[in-house]
Amino acid sequence: MAFDVVKISLFAHRLSAICEEMGAVLKRSAISPNIRDREDFSCALFDEKGELIAQAAHVPVHLGSMAFAMRDVIPRFSWQAGDVVVFNDPFLGGTHLPDITVVTPVFVGGELVAFTAARAHHADIGGLSPGSMGVETSLEDEGVVISPCYWYRAAVEDPLLARVFFDRVRAPVERMGDLSAQRAAALLGGERLNELNAINLRGMFQALCDITEGYGRAAVKKIPDGSYSFEDRLEDDGCGSGPLTIRVKVSVSGESAHVDFTGTAGQSRGPVNCPLAVTAASVYYVFRCLMPAHTPQAAAVFHPITISAPEGCLVNAGNGAAVAAGNVETSQRIVDVLLGALANAIPEHIPAAAQGTMNNVIFGGRTSNEEWVYYETVAGGMGGHSEGNGLAAVQCHMTNTKNSSIEVLEMHYPLRIASYSLRHGSGGEGIYHGGDGLIREWMIMEDCHLSLLTERRNTAPYGLAGGEAGKCGSNSLWRNGEWHPLSAKGSFELQRGDRIRLETPGGGGFGKKDKR
């Protein structure tokens, strides 16, 4: 059946609106501030084979990895109406353990036609460190691993998941509340698709994918044919190894591109390893940024792009490797190296490096015999580009969460914000300067545990076209009347009266500034 372009465009926007509504339900139903206030979640729709057909503009690392992985998860089950499947295994469709995905099938007229999915970052999933994002050396030590399994079978709940949560995670009531919010969001997506039952959904999905793939091919075709290479490095893995090189070669031929990570460092003992799904998400994000804003958010747009990475390397780690920081830190560096490579081909379209880190801060402790965990990421500077200055104090590239409301943080946790301001002058100089980072300082009101997973503390975000690098970030602890430097990654025991300060990196500058 043939469909006109206007009808397909309206259909794509309708699907996107369903995903946005799913996100609104999740946000308003969740318990934890990380999901309810920071909006660390993503919602998407898939066809019956697991092909991504629509997504909201949520968190890039969630959505790109789901586009890569869902086709492997769906064939594992014999789906019925009312089923709910849950997973977080990074090597079976996930990213890192705190990101739990809830999937539900959509039946229209008795036929399986689609799936809905809601992925959210839970503040804790067990493991050795509060927040499940410490400097561990194995996946098992990072927390509870949930391979794809039924939570509900034909609308009947299996109580095993709840028992696992209550036995092994911190603040289990909060975890189950957030998980239930994800289920509500996924079910809402199915209801909305059923409201479109007068439409030939399968036919429309296929037409949408055909059109979307054309956008991807057109974007790749605008890149001159050739091979473009770049390398950068992670500073360390938190366990004594580093720097760790990430090397990429982008080969473009006509409407196709191949991204090859040969030469990248081997997987590490520390938690900076990436499952291939996270690497794919980073690659897809960069190419999506080269496409028009109105491009439908379907996986077919990435069909012209292939990816290879040696098995057992940092960006294609083996099963069981620690991955907590791969999703949040290594993904950022993959973006940096891919943009650096493409700057050799299309410099007018590529920005200088952004801050290159999510500045992960995880606090955890016990108050009145009740455990609490708080997680947040801190914004920084974007890189300057050929058309203007980089933005200051924004979440960059693979994350798209909001900042943590001071009022919400102080209401729920024994923490106070002592300082929150722009880090003036941290963006790199250039014809167009990089955006400035932030300074954020927490006062510790009760003894607690801190984990830090940060980068760009001694290797600065690069400038382009003669622009200067942005300033590195720094972490520090106030105790006994003086400031002490803290490592980029690590776990620390804090005392009442301590202060923690993060100064986040600025973005690189673009173009050589005339200093006469």
Image (tube, helix red, strand yellow):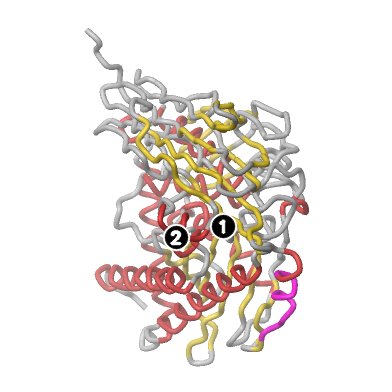
Q: Earlier in the sequence, mark 2 or mark 1?
A: 2
Residue 101 higher or lower than 272, as above or below: below
Whether residue 78 sits left or right of residue 291 in the image: it is right
Residue found at the far top of this picture: 516
Q: Position of residue 469 (x, y in %)?
A: 41, 22
Q: Position of residue 455 (x, y in %)?
A: 55, 34
**Residue at mark 2:** 39
Q: Quadrant of the N terminus?
A: bottom left
Q: Which quadrant holds residue 488?
A: top right
Question: Mark 2 or mark 1: which is in front?
Answer: 2
Q: Which residues are magenta?
A: 157-165
**In the rendering, which numbered label is found on residue 68?**
1
Mark 1 neighbour class, 10 Å CA radius: few under 14, some 14 to 19, many 20 or more: many
Magenta segment, prevailing SS (helix, strand or loop): helix
On screen, residue 61 versus residue 323, left or right, reads left
Tell me what residue is drawn at x 47 percent, y 60 percent: 411
Q: Which residue sits at x=31%, y=32%?
A: 385
